[in-house]
Image (cartoon, rainbow, N blue to C red):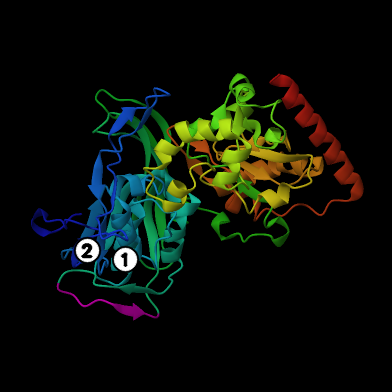
Amino acid sequence: MAIPGGQKPAEPAREWDATEPVLDAAGQPVTRWDGRTKVLHPTTGLEVPDEAARVPVLRYLDPRPAAWPGADFVVGNPPFVGAGPMREALGDGHVEALRGAHAEGVPASADLVMFWWNHAAGLVRAGQVGRFGFVTTNSLSQTFNRRVVERHLAGEALSVAPALAGTPGGERSSAPVPLSLLFAIPDHPWVDAAEGAAVRIAMAVGGPGKDLPGVLATVTREEPGSGDGYDVALAETRGVIHADLTVGADVTGAKAVKANSDLSCPGMKLHGAGFIVTPGEAAQLGLGRVPGLEQHVRPYRNGRDLTDRPRGVLVIDLFGLAAEEARQRYPEVYQWVAERVKPERDQNNRAAYRNNGWAFGEPRREFRPALAGLPRYIATVETSKHRFFVFLDAAILPDNMLVNIARDDAWVLGVLSSRVHVTWALAAGGHLGVGNDPRYNKTRCFEPFPFPAATEEQRARIRDLGERLDDGRCEAVR
């Protein structure tokens, strides 16, 4: 933050009156794994959280957005911490206080940097700061962070509480000034000074006003520089910059099509690599010998399995079974999971993950009924240099990094594979990662996409092409 005298708030995103330890039912302080220290598991030899490395869980009293020192402009490089690792990095109490203080403007799925972004944007719109500019990860334009940007660009009502030290706050503005992006670079190479790792970042400058034209700079050439950084060439485009850091057609304004609702979902989020087994390990656990186990040890596919040849692994899926039921029916499987998954789960900051250590972290219970009765379904890799769609057999469980569509009709696969849809997905889904690879987000790429009102003859033709396309891809990776 650029402020007089080089000051900066100790906690830019939120402040509180005091902290107190969280106590259990017996009145003893609750502790958590420190998020860093690991030891080798005596059975598997793998690194697992050290149960002895504990820190207290704190409750933050009266959390609220921080009162930043007075400033004309805010400039900064907030910490790069994703929504997933946030609890592990900061602790439950810190995260709950942060989200409680910014519940109005920052969704739970947003990265840590968006709390800074939301706060600075509110200050600009309230007239207490002239402009702000932040360096963030290039996920700024992704759906989970873009919602924060969209809210301010649309001029939604906000409350500033308190904004700058010594200024009044807490009043809701019924007609606040909207925000405009005056400058942005959606994707730029960056070297992490602490770890020397290559990452991709975005830069954005916000100012007061509605739909003001800005300068969008895109990288046209990049190569390693003489030091730690990169030499880049930029091309500039002028126009209204949208929340996805583009100019031109605002694809972020597209709404979901009702016909596409409840048909797509990411795959299983395991939260434990111990669920994955080889065919030999599965046989030792009873596959082919214990009746019914084939329903709970199933083929598994992730992104690399689709872009290359499948690994041939299986996954233990105890969805639908209580812990005691799983232990009695499949004792060998349950013991395997207890030794290879539970130690890691016991240190997880989310109670639902800790208390259900035999099951996937996110078993996609809402999506499974959509797949029921289908002989196959469509899948695509969420982040991939090339956008393609394939059929997966209904027996296969998909990984979290696959986006899955509960349709078995090759007409649907053919339309999704078309140049029209792929072009739409590139524009709507954005890019992510060091490789700046296209990302297929179901809420932005699939749900708003209107399938064409084709004739039966056209459908038959596209269906035939879809089948042939899928057959060709399957043959290529065998």
Q: How many numbered marks appear?
A: 2
Residue wearing tag 2: 15
* Badge 1 amino acid: Ala
From the viewer's side, name the closer residue of 213 and 407. 407
Point out the tag, 1 or 2, that comes first from the N-terminus.
2
Query: What is the x, y in percent for residue 130?
Result: 25, 64
Disc 1 crowd, CA 10 A, few/some/many (<14, 14-19, 20+): many
Q: Are marks 1 and 2 in contact (CB under 8 Å)?
A: yes
**In the displayed structure, would residue 355 be above or below residue 53?**
below
Question: Does 344 appear above or below 17?
Answer: above
Q: Residue at x 28, y 61 (%)?
A: 131
- Which residue is the site of mark 1? 101
- Write down the quadrant of residue 5 in the picture: bottom left
Which amino acid type corresponds to the residue marked 2 in the rendered image?
Glu
**Residue at position x 81%, y 43% from top?**
409
**Residue 243 visible at all:** no
- Residue 2: in sight, yes or no? yes
Query: Residue 94 lies in magenta, yes or no?
Result: no
Magenta stretch, main secondary structure, is loop
Decide if residue 42 is on the left or right side of residue 289: left
Q: In the image, residue 427 lies at what x, y percent?
A: 57, 46
The answer to whether residue 172 is magenta is yes
Calculate the distance from the C-alpha at mark 1 to the C-alpha at mark 2. 8 Å
Say which of 336 and 372 sits in front. Answer: 336
> Dot 2 surroundings within 10 Å: few (below 14), some, or many (20 or more)?
many
Q: In this view, does 73 lie above or below 460?
A: below
Determine the secondary structure under disc 2: loop
The residues colored magenta run: 166-174
Q: Where is residue 461 in the image (x, y as percent from the top left)?
A: 87, 39
Residue for point 16% across, 58% down = 9
Tell me the SS state at disc 1: helix
